[in-house]
Image: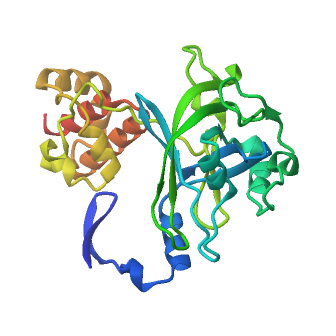
């Protein structure tokens, strides 16, 4: 497959070797590895249920996410075993007693959560095996996990069986009836602080991710504004040898390109030294301005980056 890649902003043609697969032509186990290796990181639902005898059960599932706020819906899937075609105790319990508590998984408890995924026999409480503390719920019968900073008490609205062969998912559609949040993870606005909660997630194989300061970054969502778009970028900026595709996308997020007056004022006050230094070398000047703009973008100074880039042609 012939594709276009960018190194900095130099365009060059490269042959990309793609492995193309028809799912039905490989084993379920192999397909499972590809799916989980590519779809990630995945949040983890530590699901608490009880069986017909009232015995506590606990198991983690990374086929999980939030799907609605009104009504508040969480869905997770305890899939059938790809090797044995058996079902999880969580699935059996949710069918017999349609209530569940979904607990979020943080770095502090990830080893215990991994232990809880062991194939213990039915009737064995993973709470005890994993050393996690059961906490009585307010509305539903399954227990919360005391060590988890956010716990969702849920009723099971529906279970959708996606198949009857090994590897088939079972979507457990849960409606949140009450949630509990540890106040220590809240910010000044009483919202969950992404840095304080310290969540972990699943990748392929035995790999996990930790959502900490080293791995997180922030991108402002264009909820109420519309950027000019990539197609409206000036050609000399699009073809930059310095700016990356991500840099261009950030530039394209501005609502309006700065006018000539603003550019000239910024050029005079902030960029006069750069222009004097490279007065006799236009190519070097352009590279210097683009490098400066790239730094400004990394500092979330979008307007200044635009003013710097536009100054070259003023």
Q: Quadrant of residue 195?
A: top right
Q: Quadrant of residue 262?
A: top left
Q: Quadrant of the C terminus?
A: top left
Residue 44 shows in the view: no
Residue 257 shows in the view: yes
The spot of residue 115 in percent (x, y) is: 79, 56
Of residue 100 and residue 288, the one placed in the foreground of this image is 100
The spot of residue 191 in percent (x, y) is: 55, 21
Q: Is residue 153 above or below residue 184?
A: below
How many marks the image carries: the answer is 0
> Residue sitting at 26 percent across and 36 percent down?
253
Q: Quadrant of residue 216?
A: top right
Scheme by which the image is coloured? rainbow
Q: Is residue 72 above or below residue 79?
A: above
The spot of residue 8 in percent (x, y) is: 34, 58
> Residue sitting at 12 percent across and 26 percent down?
260
> Residue sitting at 29 percent across and 49 percent down?
287
Of residue 18 and residue 231, the one placed in the foreground of this image is 18
Q: Quadrant of the N terminus?
A: bottom left
**Left or right, residue 39 beside residue 241:** right
Tell which residue pokes out farthest to the bottom in this image.
25
The spot of residue 208 in percent (x, y) is: 64, 56
């Amino acid at each position: 497959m012939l594709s276009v890649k960018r190194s900095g902003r130099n365009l060059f043609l490269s042959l990309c070797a793609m492995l193309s697969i028809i799912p039905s032509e490989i084993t379920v186990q192999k397909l499972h590895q590809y799916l989980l290796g590519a779809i990630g990181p995945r949040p983890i639902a530590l699901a608490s249920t009880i069986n017909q005898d009232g015995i506590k059960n606990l198991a983690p599932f990374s086929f999980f996410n939030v799907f609605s706020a009104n009504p508040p819906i969480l869905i997770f899937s305890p899939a059938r075993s790809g090797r044995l075609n058996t079902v999880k105790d969580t699935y059996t319990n949710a069918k017999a007693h349609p209530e569940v508590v979904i607990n979020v998984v943080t770095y502090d408890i990830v080893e215990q959560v991994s232990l809880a995924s062991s194939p213990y026999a039915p009737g064995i409480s993973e709470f005890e095996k994993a050393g996690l503390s059961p906490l009585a719920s307010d509305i539903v019968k399954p227990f919360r996990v005391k060590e988890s900073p956010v716990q969702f008490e849920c009723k099971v609205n529906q279970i959708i069986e996606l198949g009857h062969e090994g590897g088939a998912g079972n979507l457990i559609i849960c409606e949140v009836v009450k949630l509990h949040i540890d106040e220590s993870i809240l910010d000044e606005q009483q919202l969950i602080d992404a840095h304080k909660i310290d969540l972990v997630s699943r990748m392929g194989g035995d790999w996990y991710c930790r959502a900490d300061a080293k791995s997180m970054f922030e991108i402002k969502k264009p909820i109420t504004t519309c950027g000019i778009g990539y197609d409206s970028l000036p050609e000399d900026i699009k073809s930059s040898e310095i700016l990356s595709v991500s840099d261009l996308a950030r530039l394209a997020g501005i609502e309006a390109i700065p006018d000539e007056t603003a550019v000239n004022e910024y050029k005079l006050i902030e960029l006069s030294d750069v222009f004097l230094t490279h007065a006799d070398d236009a190519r070097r000047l352009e590279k210097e301005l683009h490098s400066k703009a790239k730094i400004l973008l990394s500092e979330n100074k979008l307007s200044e980056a635009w003013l710097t880039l536009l100054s070259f042609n003023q």
